[in-house]
Image: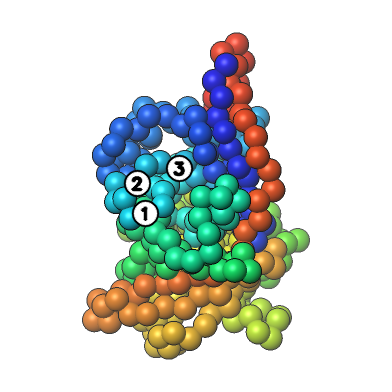
Amino acid sequence: MTRIQIIDSHTGGEPTRTVVGGGPDLGSGSLAGRLEVFREKHDAFRRAVVTEPRGSDVLVGALLVEPVDKSCVTGVIYFDNVTYLGMCGHGTIGVVSTLSYMGRIQPGEHRIETPVGIVTVVLHKDGSVSVTNIPAVRKAKGVNIHCPGIGNISGDVAWGGNWFYIVDQHGLQLELGNIDQLTSFTWSLRQAVNKQGFPEVDHIVLLAPSNVKEVHARNYVLCPGKAYDRSPCGTGTSAHLACLAADGLLAEGAELVVESIVGSRFTGSFRWADRTAGKVIPTITGTAFVMGEGTLLIDAHDPFRWGIV
Ligand code: PYC
């Protein structure tokens, strides 16, 4: 029997399963290198942790690893039901709350190493967490896509730790009751964006105004494996901030409050990293709650021990 120690949390409704023990040996290379070892040699471990029958399409995994940079409290590699993520905002907030629950960190500032760079986090005394992300940037503005069955759509392609196509003119109601329609719309859009010059895009963001006065935008975010983000998506909000900054629609240091399709909120802001290149350093604040801990058991006789493939 193989044993994997996990702690489950959710950030604004979006779950993170942090692997705190029993993970595969990925060596001692860079985190980007170790992510590739994970992908090439231990993909069954990813499936066992986050996919059915132990997990579900919405679950994001976070494998804690030794950081290369010893000023970091941990290294972490994120993964979901189909792939690996360079960074994950809701996941980082979940990891910080998990480390706090484990007694590994106290309120204050800490550094966490990810495959795409080091992020700085602040665990606030009230339990909320601010993540200062790696630089975000808009790659292309007003990218016109022809989507079969939908028509022509225009959106921005931006990086916030993952790649996003961000659309605000879509004519859809961002309501939980419309999840099937939103998912099929964004899934078609993703195929079209990928075929029409942007193969790197693996998340789609739909934006709309919110009904709540203090909230600046509501979003629906499609993740790589077709699940939708229950949180407002930290890397998606980072990419959104890069677009607003590039268009001069949000000032450096001003707050952007974004709500997810389930009504949970992140507050974001940015500072310029390189104004000429349009690069910003986003900070995202949200709250996670630890909701379970345990040991996953991998029984050598179980035909579905590595997930249903
Ligand atoms: O919060 O960055 C995020 C995220 C990515 C995928 C799901 N959540």
Which numbered disc, 3 or 1, marks the residue closer to the eye?
1
Residue 220 percent location from the top left of the image: 60, 64
Few, some or many C-alpha atoms within 10 Å of disc 3 (few <14, some 14-19, many ≥20)? some
At numbered mark 3, what does the secondary structure look like: helix, strand or loop? strand
Which mark, by number, is residue 202? none
One can see residue 38 in this view = yes
At numbered mark 1, what does the secondary structure look like: helix, strand or loop? loop
- Residue occupying image coordinates x 56% and y 24%: 3
Which residue is the site of mark 3? 64
Which mark, by number, is residue 67? 2
One can see residue 152 in this view = no
Asked if disc 1 and disc 2 are in contact, CB closer than 8 Å, the reply is yes
Q: Earlier in the sequence, mark 3 or mark 1?
A: 3
In the figure, 25 relative to 165: above or below?
A: above
Cα distance, mark 3 to mark 1?
12 Å
Which residue is the site of mark 1? 72
Residue 14 percent location from the top left of the image: 62, 54
Tell me the amino acid under the disc marked 3: Leu
Q: Kindly give the residue lying farthest to the top in the view shown.
A: 301
- Residue occupying image coordinates x 47% and y 78%: 269
